[in-house]
Image (spheres, rainbow, N blue to C red):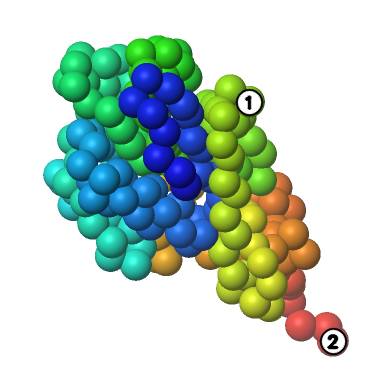
Amino acid sequence: MAFFPHSHGTLEVICGSMFSGKSEELIRRLRLARIAHQRVQVFKPALDTRYAEEELVSHSNFRIAACKVQNAGEILVRIHELTEVVGIDEVQFFDPGVVDVCNRLANMGKRVIVAGLDQDFRGRPFEPMPQLLAIGEYVTKLLAVCSVCGAPANRSQRMRGGDEVIELGATDRYEARCRRHFEPEEERQLQLLAERNHALRPPAG
């Protein structure tokens, strides 16, 4: 990704399924910005404590210092006037106000880079990512590898847990799946029910 004149605000959106390298790509771009002697600030949602409290950490253990915030509005409060590049990870965990925050930061001339899931565990658009995709100047969609067949995967299969849209986890709860092997939650529950009923059925004869 090219480096832009400081006066040109832009929004870059990195999206994809679980295990597609979104955070790793975000960290890579932020590191390059620092090598270019640009002032960088990084933010993450406070609820994401899977790997570290004060760092943005990818599944492959790439790391960069980050500030955790409770909501999107807090990002504006914490932004320094001289900051040139703003990174936001797990953007799908923020409230809808993050769309306006990203717009305002870009309008202030800052390069804003966000990363997050574009689909939830049901295979549906994960708000507010669709709105960010619509207003971003640059969009990168990354693919993972299907855990079943090895094909390119763009869906996140929840293997265990509840039915809440936001449920933290990594390989302990999720797998990357291709279109063919992705099982929407409704179909998966029906299949589990059928298997349970079959197991409880008394043997014939």
Q: Earlier in the sequence, mark 1 or mark 2?
A: 1
Number of residues whose C-alpha sits closer than 10 Å to that of mark 2, classed few (under 14), some (14–19) or many (20 or more): few
Which residue sits at x=34%, y=67%? 60
Residue position for label 1: 134
Q: Amino acid at mark 1?
A: Ala
The C terminus sits in image quarter: bottom right
Q: Amino acid at mark 2?
A: Gly
Where is residue 148? Give x, y as percent.
64, 75
Residue 47, can we see it? Answer: no
- Is residue 98 depicted above or below 196 in this figure? above
Q: Quadrant of residue 81?
A: top left
Where is residue 9? Give x, y as percent.
42, 22
Q: Secondary structure at mark 1?
A: helix
Where is residue 8? Give x, y as percent.
43, 22
Which residue sits at x=22%, y=26%? 83
Residue position for label 2: 205
